Amino acid sequence: MARKRIAVLISGRGSNMAALIEAAGDPAYPADIALVLSNVPDAGGLAVAKAKGIATETVDHKSFGKDRDGFERAIQKCLDAHRIDYVCLAGFMRLFTPDFVRQWDGRMLNIHPSLLPAFKGLDTHERAIAEGAKLHGATVHFVVPEVDSGPIIVQAAVPVLKDDTPQTLAARVIKAEHRIYPLALRWLAEGRIRIVDGRCVVEGVDSADGLLVAP
Ligand code: GRF
């Protein structure tokens, strides 16, 4: 089967992007990172991607002012030009309009640093500690118009330790993120994910496998 062509959308350092690039370096992996696109011209991840010989594009939202449609049309143009099959949001800090999201229905993933549906939005590590959560983690899910929602593909849980700061907890969670994003993309690219009644079923994966407890 031909390898699927993936665009990774970033706004920052791109460590999840780097994890996806590394996974795709394996000839047996079913997807190629064909494009890294950022809305931030100096996003650290762009340099990392370029150094790996991956095509990069910048679509700076600031140059579109309030014209969200124009911004999204510019992104779509890049995705079309690179013949992208699937989009992975990886720390991409802009919200898409429902129309754009629908255009990529079932073909766009996001990673969020919490065990959704807990702690949608920002500052998830601070909030998990403040709430006294004992488990925290990360989620890869399909993107739907509602933010940090959408069918969950895989989650990884990590413990919240007594002396954790948001930084130490974030460091534990990001390691888990780097494990589950390549896994979810693999399943998607292999055509193994079905959405049944709003929930993901992954062919050949027992639901118990969907929970990874990372050290
Ligand atoms: C990650 O924590 C991801 O879950 C969130 O944004 C952060 C991006 O980090 N959506 P990186 O740029 O992948 O290092």
Image: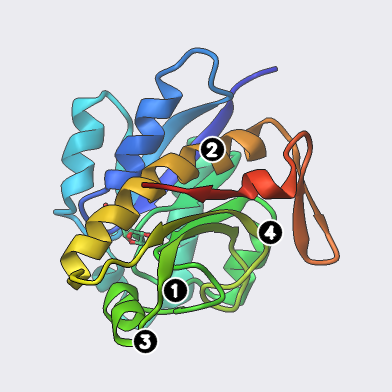
Q: Give residue 95's mark.
A: 1
Tell me the residue at 54%/43% (across/down): 80
Residue topped by disc 3: 131
The local secondary structure at tag 1 comes to loop
x, y percentage for residue 108? 58, 54
Q: CA distance from mark 1 to mark 3?
A: 26 Å
Callout 2–callout 4 Cβ contact below 8 Å: no
| On screen, residue 66 above or below 101 | below
Closer-to-camera residue (169/151): 169
Closer-to-camera residue (45/195): 195
Q: Give residue 183's mark.
A: 2
Tell me the residue at 54%/32% (across/down): 5
Q: CA distance from mark 1 to mark 4?
A: 15 Å
Q: Amino acid at mark 3?
A: Glu
The local secondary structure at tag 2 comes to helix
Q: Amino acid at mark 4?
A: Asp
- Of tags 3 and 4, which is closer to the observer? 3
Residue 66 visible in the displayed image:
yes
| On screen, residue 93 above or below 21 | below
Q: N-terminal of the two: label 1 or label 4? A: 1
Q: N-terminal of the two: label 1 or label 2? A: 1
The local secondary structure at tag 3 comes to loop
Q: CA distance from mark 3 to mark 4?
A: 33 Å
Q: Is residue 207 left or right of residue 86?
A: right
Q: N-terminal of the two: label 1 or label 3? A: 1
Q: N-terminal of the two: label 2 or label 4? A: 4
Ligand 1 in which quarter: bottom left
Task: Name the residue furthest right.
Answer: 197
| On screen, residue 205 above or below 148 | above
Q: Amino acid at mark 1?
A: Leu
Residue topped by disc 4: 105
